Image: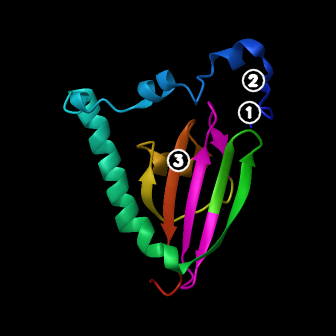
Amino acid sequence: EFQRFERFRDEAVWKSVPDPCSESTFLAARLDWSRLEKPEHAAWREHYRRLLAKRKRDIVPLIPKLSAGRCTRIEPNGAFSVDWQMSDGSALHLLANLTDRSVPVVGRAAGRVIFATHPDIRGAMAKKELAPWSVTWLLERGHDGR
């Protein structure tokens, strides 16, 4: 499955990939629950709790209303958007920039920010660009206000 990625055609890189069937890989990937209360780990745990709560509150109730999504490539190598229309005229938008540079977005989604990885998402959207390594979820209400 890695063959389509150019980087893994290099034998040295390929040798650095852990063997998914080895016991040492399994043991290295297991959570160390004894470290859970350390400040840096507790902060990450709280971060993921907040993300899961947002998903439960803002995304899950919309799922029954969603029609098939449409994915659009914004940048050839890693920036894209997905737009899902809803039966009430609303739309759920995902904007993702998985590159190391800002990417221009023209005529893209609007709406209430559900989640953004970068704090100045409104400023970035005003400049019509996505920050590097950023993800933004937006909910655009339909014309009937629902």
What's the mark number on residue 79? Answer: none
Q: Earlier in the sequence, mark 2 or mark 1?
A: 1
Q: Nearer the viewer, residue 100 or 108?
A: 100
Badge 2 amino acid: Arg
* Mark 2, secondary structure of its residue: helix
Indicate the position of residue 24 as horizontal and vertical percent values: 48, 21
In this figure, which residue is indicated by the disc labeled 1? 2
From the viewer's perspective, is residue 75 above or below residue 145?
A: above
Residue 132 counted in the magenta span: no
In this figure, which residue is indicated by the disc labeled 3? 135
Q: Nearer the viewer, residue 46 or 104?
A: 46
In this figure, which residue is indicated by the disc labeled 2? 7
Q: Nearer the viewer, mark 2 or mark 1?
A: 1
Badge 3 amino acid: Val
> Is residue 141 among what the camera can see?
no
What residue sits 57% from the left and 84% below the top?
87
Highlighted range, magenta: 83-105
Which image quadrant is residue 42 in?
A: top left
